[in-house]
Amino acid sequence: MKKQLPSKKTNFASTARSWIIPVAGLLVLVVALGVVFQNGINPTGLVIASRADNASLSNESIPPGGSAADGKVTPSQFLSRQQYFEEAFRIDRESYAIFEKAADFSGRLLDQMPAYFSLGDEEQIWSQLPPVPNDFSEIAFLLATGKFFAIQDLDERYMKQPEFYPGFKDTGLRFWTQPDATSWASNGYGTYPSEQWADLTLGETDTFEATVFIYSGFGVQTYQGLSLFVDAASQSFFDVSVSPDTFVLEPTFPQFHPEWAKKILVTGKIKPETPAGEYTITVNVGIPPESKRQEWGTEYRNLYADAASGVRPSGNPITLHVTVK
């Protein structure tokens, strides 16, 4: 019997870490995204804790995003609780006023913005993304609060929208509304949800699978090649595979490219000799095989970069906590 790791808890607290490292006159951005779901009991015994960008949420606090005058959504704006929840993740890109805000920030004229961003118009930022489904805001909110369980069923219509990831409206949009022409973000990625828990029982549920989304950091201008690998210690007790394990994350700036985010499936099976106990399985980002680096370097030229760098965030991009009984 296979156990799928779903979302669980009702509250989360968030931390965000970022590193800016000078490299050959450029700035390399590496971001560690951290959100932890807490409280509540899931009858399945499975939990997800997510990494998201600078978000904070509890039963009484305000979810990231919004369309009020100050850019936030507050409960007092709505009589309906359901409408409030859906509004928090609603996509209304015209309200972002990116070119207008970027012109004010940079001291340039509004009609200079297309050339400044190397885009035909503001809508081109999103032109390569899939259409937004009607229930997007509700599903995104349920996932962020740990109440959506069928993560493996979410397709690109959901996971390739930047608003799917908590914190985009609060911190991600600034790369467009407050552009910095003195530096380029050439390296950075995030995972969501990044931590998951599972209870397995020897002789009954001996396999599991976890779905995680990995995406290029907001503002990143390069094609990032990477390989995902499972730590060696975990392989002593579980047969674990990651699919896909080697690929390119495409740029998010100045426009989102089609493959800026990927769905990752991690599957595992208890080895026969594994005793009962608590185990942690980690999946890390590494440099891809040299043949792939050469291939992608030829294809993308100066826009290619390895996602893994000499300096990386603390912690692991993907962590699975498994209890074997």
Image (cartoon, rainbow, N blue to C red):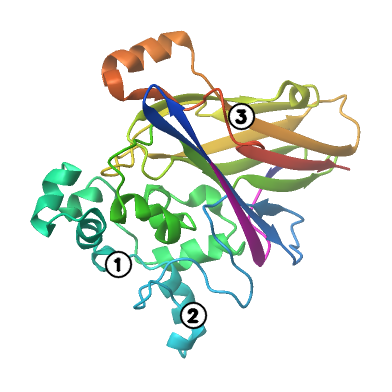
Q: Is residue 272 magenta?
A: no
Identify the secondary structure beneath mark 3.
strand
On the image, numbered disc 1 is attached to which residue? Answer: 92
Which region is colored magenta?
Answer: 5-18
For the residues labelled 2 and 1, the Cα–Cα distance comes to 18 Å
Is tag 2's residue or tag 1's residue first in the polypeptide sequence?
2
Q: Quadrant of residue 257?
A: top left
Residue at horizontal 35%, vertical 34%? 250
CB within 8 Å, label 2 to label 1:
no
Q: Amino acid at mark 1?
A: Asp
Pick whichever, 136 or 100, lies toward us.
Answer: 100
Give the vertical position of 168 relative to 87 (above or below). Answer: above
Residue at horizontal 38%, vertical 68%? 90
Is tag 2's residue or tag 3's residue first in the polypeptide sequence?
2
Name the mark nearer the viewer: 2 or 3: 3
On the image, numbered disc 3 is attached to which residue? Answer: 284
Name the mark nearer the viewer: 2 or 1: 1
Where does residue 49 sit, x and y in percent of width and height?
66, 52
Where does residue 167 sit, x and y in percent of width and height?
48, 58
